[in-house]
């Protein structure tokens, strides 16, 4: 055998190994509650148990038994935190014959019992402190899709080599005579995140992500080498649109803030991110990514709820009023403290002097406030008469006149999503032939950062003067 033939034979062997291991990994993921012995997995791979054991450990850096045990326990840990399923039910779903066996294995892996883990982890994932909803998704019913993919671990899913291998594979590029894609349509790049959420559950270097490209409807290819084929689950999804560089922060916000406050239940399917931009080109730039989170529920009822949370622009006339206020330049991270501290200081002066209020507290944005810019924000309380003031408290006028406004509930009142409602008011003013006549403001219907406010009660109005 020549050197060239030997190299070719070795490459074909490696491709065959990868192809069979892909089938095994998919089988494990879809059959966690079934017997997953070395013998059973070797049969899926088409290898002898001895040979399969060696191949699996060489490629995955852990034995198949250790891998299955870890995946089962980490899946159960996520369900403990994200659901209210009984421990007994989770034990059986994770492939354990008895709850006692599950509890022993769980405690050995996580150092605490399943019930203690649920108690300890839930507060970390579901913050008890005041946090308004960060996101407002749309709800969609998606059909199942065929996905050509490469299973990755850790940071591998963001590597250029993986995505280039996918994009240039003969069965995908048309090199084999038939393309699985419409050449006039942009490709859809997908990352299936099998270990979300991972905080305190799966080590970052062991996070499983399937990097893939959606096939056109009706298209099909055969697995070959590292490139496998699987079905991306259909069903109802909560869909989040992200544009920026902090995709990880978006994932955290979905699971830590949106999910517990939405009172929705997750389906037992992995979430995924989809983009029309080649992943390597997104590095160091703002990403335009759509995140799909599988949920239970009627699409009709969910979309009705979504529509109810889309407020309309209203108009009114307001009088000029006297106002006590404090103005500071703040970045977005300092805004909460400024709102809270300034309101408390103004409220204390009003209580001490006995002057009568003449309206709800306001925050007026005289300049842009973001992570990069510290614009001036004036926190004020309208009053019917003015007391003596000192220090940073000033006496001024809250301008009246024609205003357009939107009323938001607490779920909708958080940065950066709240900016979309500012845009809606601004757009209404422009489209109706008016001009901006002053700085936009937030009028708090209770108090700024009211810790007793309920998520679905009216919380603030975005008000913009116009002429």
Image (cartoon, rainbow, N blue to C red):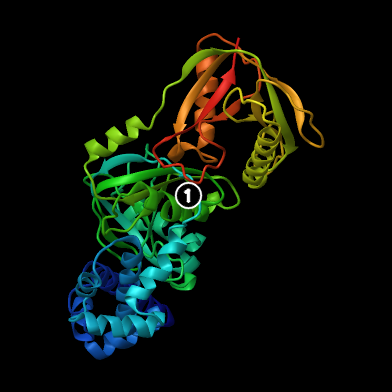
Disc 1 is placed on an element classified as: loop
Residue at image location 34% in from the left, 60% down from the top: 149
Q: Indicate left or right for 455 with 358 as reference.
A: left
Q: Quadrant of residue 139?
A: top left
Write down the quadrant of residue 32 in the picture: bottom left
Q: Pointer 1: residues within 10 angstroms few (<14), some, or many (20+)? A: some
Identify which residue is drawn at 27% across, 60% down. 229
Q: Position of residue 396 (x, y in %)?
A: 74, 22
Residue 153, relative to residue 446: is it above or below?
below
Task: State left or right for residue 78 relative to residue 318.
Answer: left
| x and y percentages locating residue 372 in the rendered image | 69, 43
In the picture provided, is 409 more to the left or to the right than 348? left
Q: Residue at x 51, y 56 (%)?
A: 248
At x 34%, y 63%, the residue is: 227
Quick check: 269 above or below 245? below
Question: Where is the N terminus found, in terms of image quarters?
Answer: bottom left
Q: Residue furthest right?
A: 391
* Image quadrant assignment for residue 357: top right
Q: Kindly identify which residue carries mark 1.
A: 278
Residue 27 position, x and y percent, is: 23, 70
């Amino acid at each position: 055998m020549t050197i060239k033939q030997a190299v070719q034979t070795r490459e074909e062997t490696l491709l065959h190994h990868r192809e069979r291991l892909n089938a095994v990994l998919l089988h494990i993921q879809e059959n966690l509650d079934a017997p997953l012995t070395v013998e059973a997995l070797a049969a899926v791979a088409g290898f002898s148990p001895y040979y399969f054991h060696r191949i699996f450990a060489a490629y995955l850096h852990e034995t198949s038994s250790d891998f299955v045990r870890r995946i089962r326990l980490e899946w159960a840990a996520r369900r403990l935190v994200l659901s209210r399923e009984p421990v007994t039910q989770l034990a059986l779903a994770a492939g354990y014959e008895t709850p006692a066996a599950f509890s022993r294995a769980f405690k050995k892996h996580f150092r605490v019992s399943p019930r203690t883990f649920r108690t300890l982890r839930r507060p970390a994932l579901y913050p008890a402190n005041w946090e308004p909803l960060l996101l407002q998704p749309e709800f969609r019913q998606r059909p199942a899709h065929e996905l050509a993919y490469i299973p990755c671990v850790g940071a591998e899913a963001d590597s250029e080599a993986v995505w280039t291998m996918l994009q240039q594979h003969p069965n995908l590029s048309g090199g084999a005579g038939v393309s699985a894609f419409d050449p006039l349509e942009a490709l859809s790049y997908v990352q299936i995140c099998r270990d979300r959420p991972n905080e305190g559950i799966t080590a970052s270097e062991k996070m499983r992500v399937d990097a893939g490209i959606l096939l056109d409807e009706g298209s099909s290819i055969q697995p070959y080498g590292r490139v496998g084929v699987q079905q991306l689950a259909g069903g109802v999804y909560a869909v989040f649109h992200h544009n920026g560089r902090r995709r990880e922060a978006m994932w955290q916000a979905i699971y830590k803030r949106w999910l517990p406050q939405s009172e929705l239940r997750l389906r037992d399917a992995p979430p995924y991110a989809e983009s029309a931009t080649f992943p390597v080109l997104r590095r160091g730039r703002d990403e335009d990514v759509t995140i799909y989170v599988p949920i239970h529920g009627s699409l009709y009822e969910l979309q009705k709820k979504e529509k109810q949370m889309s407020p309309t622009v209203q108009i009114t006339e307001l009088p000029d009023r006297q106002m006590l206020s404090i103005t500071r330049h703040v970045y977005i991270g300092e805004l909460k403290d400024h709102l809270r501290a300034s309101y408390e200081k103004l409220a204390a002066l009003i209580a001490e002097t006995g002057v009568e209020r003449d309206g709800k507290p306001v925050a007026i944005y005289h300049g842009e406030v973001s992570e990069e810019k510290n614009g001036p924000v004036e926190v004020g309380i309208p009053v019917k008469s003015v007391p003596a003031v000192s220090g940073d408290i000033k006496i001024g006028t809250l301008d009246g006149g024609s205003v357009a406004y939107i009323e938001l509930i607490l779920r909708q009142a958080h940065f950066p999503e709240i900016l979309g409602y500012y845009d809606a008011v601004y757009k209404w003013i422009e489209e109706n032939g008016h001009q901006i006549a002053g700085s936009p403001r937030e009028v708090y219907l209770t108090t700024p950062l009211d810790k007793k406010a309920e998520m679905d009660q009216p919380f603030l109005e975005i008000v913009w003067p116009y002429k």
